[in-house]
Image: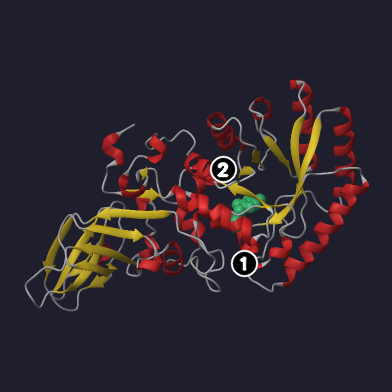
Amino acid sequence: MDQTRSLSPIRAEVDTTAITANIRRCGELAGGAAVMGVVKAGGYGHGALTAARAALEGGAALLGLAQPVEAIALKRELPHAEVLAWLLTPDTDLDAAVAAELTLGVAAPWALDAVEAAAERSGRTVRVHLEVDTGMCRAGVAPEEWPAVVARARRAEEAGTLRVEGIFSHLACADEPGHPATDAQRERFEAALADATEAGLRPRWRHLANSAAVATRPDLAYDLVRPGLMTYGISPVPDQHDAAALGLRPALRWEAQLSTVRRVPAGSGVSYGHTHVVPTDRWLGVVPLGYGDGVPRSASDRAQVAVHTSTGTLLAHVAGRVCMDQFVVDLGPAAQGTAPAAAGDRVTLVGDPVRGEPGVEDWAAWTDTISYEVVTRIGPRVPRTGPGGAPLDGRGTRRAAG
Ligand SMILES: *Cc1c(COP(=O)(O)O)cnc(C)c1O
């Protein structure tokens, strides 16, 4: 473990107990359905291995990731976990995926052939989840190809090459409660399940619900739900319910330390392009994080951070453009001589809104994006630690599995 890095004042602290509790909460919201912890993209920026361990602790029945390479890295650390990877391409090394004992998502007819061939080469029975497109037009077997795919999958089961453990689909509009596409997708999913039954498949896991559906449509839980964002304590429907109202706890705390505090006279232009000109004499602070660390450049002149000073916490606006490595915040008027903050004061970019700190959802709103993008962009220069900078899981900030 690298002590220096994990004790860095700049860090993304991950509270694994929050992830564990959020997984349990998702199970409750889903009426007792099983839960898959979705830990793709480095556990939504929190660290795949960290998130996976915490999700298993919370009773997750499966772990889900997109790319087989990320799943293989995780499976190496957690050999007893059931790990599903659903994003195959024709050049995916399926022999490695099969050797690693991944469960594979099959989302196209060619993938069924390829996985079956890999299973034959290995002499094993490969567990698969078949994905049907019910109206998102992204991944998933097209409706017109589905009957043939389930029939062939059943023959592969009889031949002992594959075992169809799951059938799933993905919702396009679940984050807009009441959107008619969701019910249309449910109906097509029901029809696809009926086709599978008719073909003789008896999947253990039928699954459709992402976070937004877990939050708003418990009737779509089936056997298993696949919350990603909610695993990390972030609301998938921030306009309807904040995370606390959903019974979730944010797992991420993004911290830094003011590197400088100084007074500037009225009329001073701040940062590149002088997009911000201070109206009066002001105190400014410098935060040593920038877009090279995942602070969105579109947060320039828009976002706020919490600065924890010796006398309390103040919210400070980003002043001027976010740079690659640093940005400036406005700490207030400099009419009186005393600085409201000092170099070394702790700065919270992302904390707990319940405590008056900015949340991931706030950054998403300030930067015209979604919470998913905010967390997955936090860069490798930001060490992931436990609360207070403690090493994660006693293993420091290992990068192997994200
Ligand atoms: C990313 C993903 C999820 C998780 O989505 P959230 O909105 O984060 O809950 C579930 N299923 C699939 C197929 C995904 O790609």
Q: Name the residue rendered at 23%, 69% in the picture.
A: 330
Residue for badge 1: 175
Where 134 falls versus 62 (above or below)? Answer: below
The quarter of the picture where residue 69 lies is top right
Where does the image place residue 101, in percent across and percent down from the top left?
A: 67, 29
Residue situated furthest left in the rendering: 337
Where 128 falls versus 366 (above or below)? Answer: above
Where does the image place residue 199, in percent across and percent down from the top left?
A: 92, 44
In the displayed structure image, the side of residue 15 where residue 172 appears, left or right: right
* Quadrant housing the N terminus: top left
Which residue is nearer to you in this view: 362 or 137?
A: 362
Q: In the rendered structure, which amino acid carries the disc numbered 1?
A: Asp
* Label 1 CB less than 8 angstroms from ligand 1: yes
- The answer to whether residue 290 of the structure is visible from this angle is no
Where does the image place residue 71, in percent across and percent down from the top left?
A: 59, 36
Q: Secondary structure at mark 1?
A: loop
Residue for badge 2: 56
Q: Which mark is residue 400?
A: none
Residue situated furthest right in the rendering: 198
Which residue is nearer to you in this view: 135 or 347?
A: 347
- The answer to whether residue 58 of the structure is visible from this angle is yes
Q: Secondary structure at mark 2?
A: helix
Q: Residues within 10 Å of mark 1 (few under 14, many from 20)?
A: many
Which residue is nearer to you in this view: 381 or 233?
A: 233
Q: In the rendered structure, which amino acid carries the disc numbered 2?
A: Leu
Where does the image place residue 386, in percent across and percent down from the top left?
A: 37, 45
Q: Name the residue rendered at 82%, 60% in the picture.
A: 188
In the displayed structure image, the side of residue 23 where residue 7 appears, left or right: left
